[in-house]
Amino acid sequence: MSNKNVKWEWKKLKDICEKGSSSVKQGDLKGVNGNYPIYGASGFIQNVDFFQQSQEYIGIVKDGSGVGRTMLLPAKSSVIGTLQYILPKEGNSLKFINYALQNFDFSKLIQGAAIPHIYFKDYGEMDLAVPPIDEQKRIVKVLDETFEKIEKIKSNAQANLQNAKDLFQTTLFASFEKISVDDNYLLKDVAIDFSRGKSKHRPRNDKILFGGEYPFIQTGDIRNADKYVAEYTDTYNEVGLAQSKLWPEGTLCITIAANIAETAVLTIPCCFPDSIIGFVPDIRKTDVDYVYYLLQYFKGELQIMGKGAAQDNLNLGTFEKMKFPFPPLPIQKQIVAKLDSLSEKVKQLESNYKQILADCDELKKATLKKAFEGML
């Protein structure tokens, strides 16, 4: 509950704190060891044999990605030159200033097109309502307790999501480990088409091939898909199609170069390069969803097999030697049904988790706003 009898004063940020600069470059730290931590924009870098601040302080990112982000850092530590030190002036709470900076919108003060940066001479001029030190400490205590509860909510949601993912992986492995080895076949034996994409694939800006009506995907589209490929960023024209192939909806795509052993199922007809194998199932023998889960199970093994000297890769020869378990269709469908059900639950938990994170972030923003409007 706010103390309405406490008098707040409008001050500029530079009136309650001061900044310090660092000239340390991360490249200067090579081979340096010691007992004192040094930090960068992403957090702890390493221990070194020196420190620049003897007391606890705020590190604020002033250059590059994440400008304006703050972190409370310990005494006897340092930051590299992409951060600044923020130190409280007498009679002011370091944590209160940190929360004030988290409540501030730096977007209006960012300069630089290629590398964004902010300057204390600019954000030090921001006006801030400041109560006496005892009220600052009370507000900090309330915010600390509130944010601790919010972090616990996020942590519990994340743990529930991870438990669901672990259960899915356990069920996936159990589903295939118990299949009899007598049911092993080559992938080409259960397919009506099993071959590499035919595109020679020239650069994206080659107007001879691109800019038509035929969807064209690459390995990154497979890697980023959530089982199904429904979107594409490039298209082939008639010339591109003539030197490629339009694979049908329901094709299972398997990446064999760069991001190897990633899989996804087409929901639209697509062309793709020879860094992807297309698998069109013989529905009398198998189901595309079964093969998708099957290759999820064997993904680690395939990735190990594809380790190369220059670039990881697989080829059709790998699959001409490797047999996979294919039990009778009714058993395949039972496995797919169980894994589909679990997969949907995981996706729902992921959706819930993202919403919880968004809600928690909004709650933190709203709580900070109330704190600095004297309503906490």
Image (spheres, rainbow, N blue to C red):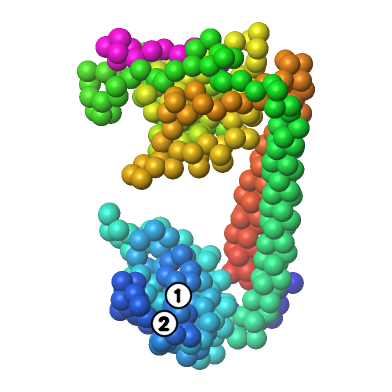
Q: How many marks?
A: 2
Residue 150 position in % (x across, y down): 69, 61
Q: CA distance from mark 2 to mark 1?
A: 8 Å
Residue 335, above or below 117: above
Depicted 98 relative to depicted 203: above or below: below
Mark 2 residue type: Asn
In the rendered view, does 328 fall on the left or right side of 252? right
Region of the chain picked out in magenta, as a range: 237-250
Residue at mark 1: 46
Place of residue 175 in the rendered image (x, y in percent of width and height, measured from the top left): 74, 32
Asked if residue 3 lies in the magenta stretch, the reply is no
Is disc 2 surrounded by few (<14), some (14 to 19) or many (20+) residues within 10 Å? few
Secondary element type, mark 2 = loop
- The amino acid pointed to by label 1 is Gln
Residue beneath the point at 75% across and 37% down: 174
Query: Which residue is tagged 2?
Result: 33
- In the rendered structure, the answer to whether residue 137 lies left or right of residue 79 reads right
Name the residue at 59% across, 10% down: 282
